[in-house]
């Protein structure tokens, strides 16, 4: 099967379960992330992505944010475990390297908002031993039919195609999660007892100051740091440009230091 056919089969698998909009992203060799957001899967700029990939950029995709989708993602699942999942739940298995684990896209029996997808992913990752660092409800996976330059330029291939049925049954407990707000408010409130409310630095009303207060507040309430990082990348991308990932990582690291310090001081 040719590379373009792997891409087509991955996209067709998503449309088969009514996932019809996607975010496409490329990461260049220098770390720059370039996004194409909330596009119809029929309008994805695949020619542009192939040209970037030929020059060393990695290509990623996810169901578009801001919508409910019947699809959850797992990373770094070994092939011997991934194939039974494909049979049991009609999951798509994307092999990202010959020696590494697979990306698994598991169709669900109902559409889930982002925070519900996060909870399902957490449960599955713990049960199956998948990468817990790739659990966020909106994580990117590699697009099949492109080279994985992190692994020396090997091809990313569809190993098992998506089936319409069967689907992963979602327990009632996950349906009670509050709908995701556009401001990305955290789904659980686990504020550190006695910690002071986060404020922008010295009354700093600049975008960076406001983002600092926002990140601190999310971490104080128990949000996963990696998810906060991804949120900040999305929020600040248009303003920070090529520097956004360094900025987001540094902001989250410094905010974690602040939150942990506040916790220790009250023990």
Image: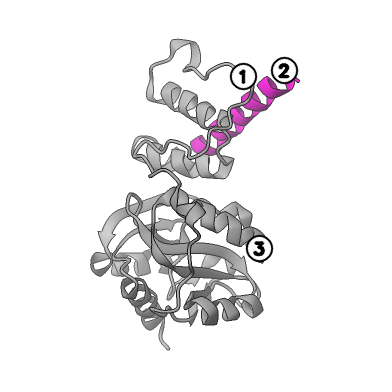
Report the residue at 51% width, 53% height from top: 173
Residue contact at pointers 1 and 2, CB within 8 angstroms: yes
The first of marks 1 and 2 along the sequence is: 1
Judge by depth and name the residue closer to the eye, 50 or 55.
Answer: 50
Report the residue at 50% width, 60% height from top: 171
User: How busy is the neighbourhood of tag 1: few (under 14 within 10 Å), some, or many (20 plus)?
Assistant: some
- Quadrant position of the N terminus in the picture: bottom left
Secondary structure at badge 3 equals helix
Figure quadrant of residue 161: bottom left
- Quadrant position of the C terminus in the picture: top right
The first of marks 3 and 2 along the sequence is: 3
Q: State yes or no: residue 210 in magenta.
A: no
Which of the labelled discs sits on residue 266, or is there none?
2
> x, y (%) of residue 186?
48, 37
Q: Badge 1 is on which residue? A: 195
Query: Magenta segment range?
Result: 247-267
Q: How many labels does the image show?
A: 3
> x, y (%) of residue 180?
39, 44
């Amino acid at each position: 099967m040719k590379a373009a056919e792997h891409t087509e089969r991955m996209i067709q698998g998503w449309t088969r379960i009514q996932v019809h909009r996607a975010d496409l992203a490329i990461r260049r060799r220098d770390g720059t992330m370039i996004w194409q957001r909330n596009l119809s899967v029929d309008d994805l700029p695949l020619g542009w992505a192939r040209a970037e990939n030929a020059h060393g950029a990695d290509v990623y995709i996810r169901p578009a944010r801001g919508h409910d989708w019947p699809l959850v993602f797992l990373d770094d699942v070994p092939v011997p475990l991934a194939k039974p999942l494909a049979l049991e739940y009609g999951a798509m298995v994307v092999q990202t390297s010959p020696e590494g684990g697979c990306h698994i896209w598991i169709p669900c029996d109902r559409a889930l908002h982002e925070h519900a997808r996060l909870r399902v992913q957490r449960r599955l990752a713990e049960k199956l031993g998948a990468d817990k660092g790739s659990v966020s409800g909106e994580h990117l996976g590699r697009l099949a039919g492109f080279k994985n330059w992190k692994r020396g330029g090997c091809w990313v291939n569809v190993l098992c195609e998506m089936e319409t049925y069967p689907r992963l049954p979602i327990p009632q407990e996950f349906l009670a999660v509050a709908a995701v707000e556009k401001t990305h408010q955290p789904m659980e409130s686990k504020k550190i007892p006695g910690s002071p409310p986060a404020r922008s630095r010295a009354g700093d009303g600049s975008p960076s100051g406001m983002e600092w207060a926002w990140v601190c507040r999310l971490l104080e309430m128990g949000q996963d740091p990696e998810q906060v990082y991804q949120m900040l990348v999305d929020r600040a991308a248009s303003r920070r440009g090529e520097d956004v990932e360094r900025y987001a990582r540094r902001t989250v690291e410094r905010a974690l230091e602040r939150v942990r310090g506040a916790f220790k001081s009250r023990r």
